[in-house]
Image: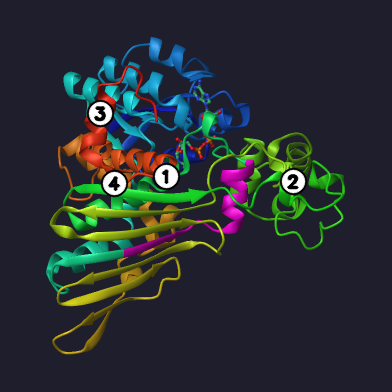
Amino acid sequence: MKKLKAILIGAGLRGITYTDFIAENRDKFELVAVAEPADSRRNYIKKKHALSNGLCFTDYKPLLEKGKIADVAIIATMDRDHFEPVMEAIRLGYDILLEKPIAPTPRECEAITSLAEKMGSRILVCHVLRFTPFFVALKEIIDSGKIGEIVSISQIECVGNEHQSHSFVRGNWGNEAKSSFMLLQKSCHDMDILQWLIGTECRQVQSFGSLTYFTEKNAPNGAPDYCIEGCPVGETCPYNAVKLYLKSDSDWFRSASTKMVNPNDDDVKKAISSTQYGKCVFRCDNNVVDHQVVNLLFDGGVTVSFTMCAFNKGGRTIHIMGTKGEIEARLEDNKPIQIYTFADKAVSEYDYAAMGGEGQAGGHSGGDEGIMEAFYNYIANGEAGKNICTVERSLKNHYIAFAAEHSRRSGAVINVEDYMNSIKNEEDYSI
Ligand SMILES: NC(=O)c1ccc[n+]([C@@H]2O[C@H](COP(=O)([O-])OP(=O)(O)OC[C@H]3O[C@@H](n4cnc5c(N)ncnc54)[C@H](O)[C@@H]3O)[C@@H](O)[C@H]2O)c1
C-alpha cells in the first residue's frame, strides 16, 4: 500500500480532524510538517505526529518555501486565507485537500481552478456531506429509480440556534469581511449536495434572507458587553457565554474560543472575558444572515426550495418528490429514511445508520472519515470515486451560491450561467 506524505496548513478544528484521521491510518498517510500560528494547536500536532522543530512552522510561507516535501497538502486555514497557500501549493506541484469554500470570491475560485488545471494538480474540496451514509443512501435510492425522475426537492438546513451564535455571530464566520457570506460558507454544502443528488445543472436562482435577530436592537436592558460581567437575564438567556463555554463540556466550543487543544477553565475564562466568544450575542460585529431561502431551477424543470435558518435545534431535513414516489428524511436523528411508492402505496425504510458503523458517529455524521478515505484512493490509486467533488465541479456549484447571493442583494431572479459569464468580464469580480 502506497503511503502518502502530507503537510498541514492550518491546524484548527478542521485541520486537526483530518490529521487525527492520519494518526489513526498511518499505513495510508504520514504527516511530515505543519504550519499553524497557535502554539497549543501546533504543539498538539507536533507531538501526535512526532515532528521535529524544523518541520513545525508558525506560518504557511516558510513551510512552502521548503519546496515540495510531501505528496499532498491539506489546506484548512480560514476562508480568506485559502487563496495564497493554495496557489503556491499548486505551483509547487502538490495535490490538495482544500477546505470549503474554495475562496470567498469568484475571481479567486476561478484562479485556483485554472492554475490547478494548468499544473495538473488534483484538488478535492471538502464537501463532506457527500460521504455521509445519509446522503450516500439518498443518492443510491434516487439512482435506483425507485421514486422515478426527481420533480422537486425541499431541503432545510437547520443550523441550530447555539451553532449560529457560536460560529456565525460570535465566531469565525459572523462577519463577512473576515470570512465569506453565509450561503457560501455554510450552505455551499447544500448547493453542492442538491446538484449532486439531482445530477444536472442549476439554471436559475432567486433568494431572500436577512439578519433579523442577533442585532443590537434586541440586546436586553442592562446587558453588559461580556456575559461574564453579570447579565440581568443571564439565567434564562440561551446564549449566556458562561453557560455555553465555561460550564459546558463542548470540546468544540471550548477549543474554538481559546484556539487551544484541551483548554482548562482558566483558558476558557480568559477567552470569554476578552474575545468575541464572550460577548453578548446582540453586541457582536456579525453581519451575516440568520435565515435565507433560495429557489432553484435545474435542467428538466426540476425545482428546489432550500431554507437555511438559525432558529431550531439543528440538523437537515429533505423531501424528494419523484414521478413514482417520494423520500422523506432527516439527518441527525438516525431515523431510517422513509420511501413511499405510488404504485403499491407502500412505505419502505432505508436504515442508513446501519451503513455507517463507526463513521456514522464520527465527525459530520461520518463525512470526515469518508472524505479522507476518498482522498487517499483518489491520490494514491487514481480512483475518482463517485462521491468526490473536484475543484472544477465545486467551482460550478460555488457559482450557484454566488448567483443566489447576488439575487438576495439585488432582488432579481438570476440565470446562473449568464451571471457567471457577466462577472467574469468585470474588472474585479468579487461578489
Ligand atoms: N467541510 C466542512 O464541513 C467545514 C466545517 C467547518 C469549517 N470548514 C472550513 O474549514 C476552514 C477552517 O475552519 P476551522 O473551523 O478549522 O477554523 P479554525 O479557525 O479552527 O482553523 C484555522 C486555523 O488556521 C490557522 N492559521 C491562521 N493563519 C495561518 C497561517 N498564516 N498559516 C497557517 N495557519 C494559519 C489559525 O490559527 C487556525 O488554527 C474554513 O475555511 C471553514 O470554512 C469546513
Q: What is the magenta range?
A: 154-170
Going from N to C along the chain, the mark reached first, 1 or 2, is: 2
The residue tagged with tag 2: helix, strand or loop?
loop
Task: Identify the disc placed on residue 408.
Answer: 1
- Tags 3 and 2 touching, CB below 8 Å: no
Q: Is residue 186 above or below residue 55?
A: below
Labels 4, 1: front one:
1
Marks 3 and 4, how far apart at CA: 38 Å
Task: Identify the disc placed on residue 280.
Answer: 2
Labels 1, 2: front one:
1
The residue tagged with tag 1: helix, strand or loop?
helix
Going from N to C along the chain, the mark reached first, 2 or 4, is: 2
Are there few (<14), some (14-19), or many (20+) residues within 10 Å of tag 2?
A: many
Whole-percent x and y of residue 244? 70, 53
Residue at (76, 34) in percent of width and height: 274
Identify which residue, 127 or 345, lies in the foreground: 345
Identify which residue, 402 or 24, lies in the foreground: 402
